[in-house]
Amino acid sequence: MATWAWAPLAAPASTTSGNSLPMRKVSSRLNQGGRWLQRAAHLLPALGLAALLAACEVTGELTPDETDQVQSGTVYVDTLTVRMSTVLVDSVPTSTSDYLLVGQVQDARLGTVTARSYLRLGLSGAFRPDADAQLDSLVLHLPPDTYRYGDTTQLQHLQVHRLTEALRPGTTYYAFNSRAYEAAPLGTRAFRARGKLATIRVRLTDALGQELLRAGSGRQLTSNDELNARLPGLALTPGTADNAALLRLLATSTSLQLQLYYHSPATPDVSTLYAFTAAAVNQHFYQLHADRRGSLLTALTTTRQSLPSARTAAETYLQGGLGLQTKVEIPYLLRLNELGGTWVINSAQLLVETVAGTESRNLAAPGQLTVQLTDRGNHSGRFLTNSSGTVLTVSYQTGVSRSTNLEQGRYVFSVQAYCEAALNHTLANNGLLLAPATPDTPERAVLGAPGNTNPPRLAVYLTKVK
């Protein structure tokens, strides 16, 4: 049986944060069967392990820094089995966010993603119009930020509905929650979600404006509770046939206002403005819904359920807000314990690539991922951290794929600490969960699993020290 010592950590790779080691630039040749065993029998005495690994020796030219790291007896292994599956995890809270999301994107792989938002309004001050005041207009002002996800060149619609079910005070709402609203919209605005879009203005029905004006004149809107009893809030929804972009709105901005314009018959040319604001009550949330019908994820319906990549065309998926994560397992890792002597792991890096043709300017992959421990039940454990205790984040990068020789998106991260702990039996070898580092927005990635043109690659450097 092997024993495992701790290898000194090299400087972090520039493509990830944390204690990852840079991949050595080596030219390796695959030496299977007896020929490899004749060269490395003193390193791999276990015949079962040799058959499992079909490993590589370190050969070729190294840089000066790399030469210092290579010691006698170092072995490079890149044939350990990696398993991947897609896991559905718990929804994320959205009522604690400072944002709203609205829009709809039709994704050929992951189905149609629809974002709806719900908000309550409050009084910005005393609202006491004269009894003879006359309505000019009622306009909802919605301030977006710069976030867009989807095709911003397509025409899309924002519909405003009257809530029939109020938001409950003190309740945490999640991305799967919703509130009931009237089917007929109070107003609709067609627009394109261009980057320079500063404000979305939606003219609402005069009937609601007249109702609010009469209630104010009758001194029936003297508190937020009175307003909530009359107007529980608003729902913001996309058009049912839209296939455009998801747009993010600033929910806590004082610019998010329902503006009521009215005038006195004595001065018809002088309009008075009263603003009902969302910031006055700060109660809102957004819903994310995915219609997976017709996709490879139709069978993924239960929280903590996993779907092996063999059932999803040798692909796995990540999607923030909707709870899609990728589970990575190294099922035969503990077979390395069949080695004799004392060993260190100099480096263990896992590379996962995005599947060719699944990314675009409109559907970009997450900029960063986090890595968590998990168990057999696919529960989320602690995050992997670097030596200073900071959560390890894995940055998206592009590079030439070893499999296709084409420029491809990928994530590269160190699993050295995980492998060491599993081999020393201080951690169960139950795998890792990959997830977008921003779990409340719906960026997605399609990752190549074993059997795909863009498969994962686990590269391990082992050194026998005695």
Image (tube, rainbow, N blue to C red):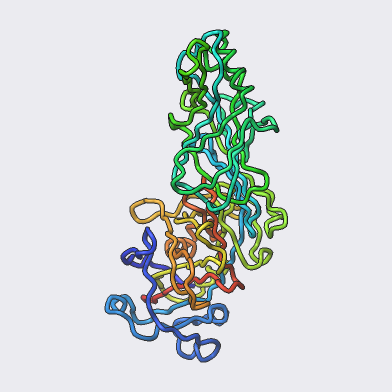
Nearest to the observer: residue 272 or residue 156: 272
The location of residue 132, given as percent across then percent down, is 56, 9
Percent of width and height locating residue 396: 44, 61
Give the answer, above or below, for where 61 lies relative to 337: below
Question: Vertical placement of 109 versus 438: above or below?
Answer: below
* Depicted 219 relative to depicted 456: above or below: above
Which of the image's four quarters has the C terminus? bottom left
Residue 450 lies in what quarter of the image?
Answer: bottom right
Residue 26 makes an appearance in the image = yes
The foreground one among 395 and 231 is: 231
Q: Residue at x 63, y 68 (%)?
A: 314
Q: Residue at x 44, y 31 (%)?
A: 255
Q: Quadrant of residue 430?
A: bottom right
All told, the count of numbered labels is: 0
Residue closest to the eye, 325 or 74: 325
| The quarter of the displayed image where residue 455 is located | bottom right
The answer to whether residue 90 of the structure is visible from this angle is no
* Residue drawn at the location 44% of the way across and 46% of the way down: 196
Residue 128: x and y in percent read 50, 10
Q: Position of residue 260 (x, y in %)?
A: 52, 22
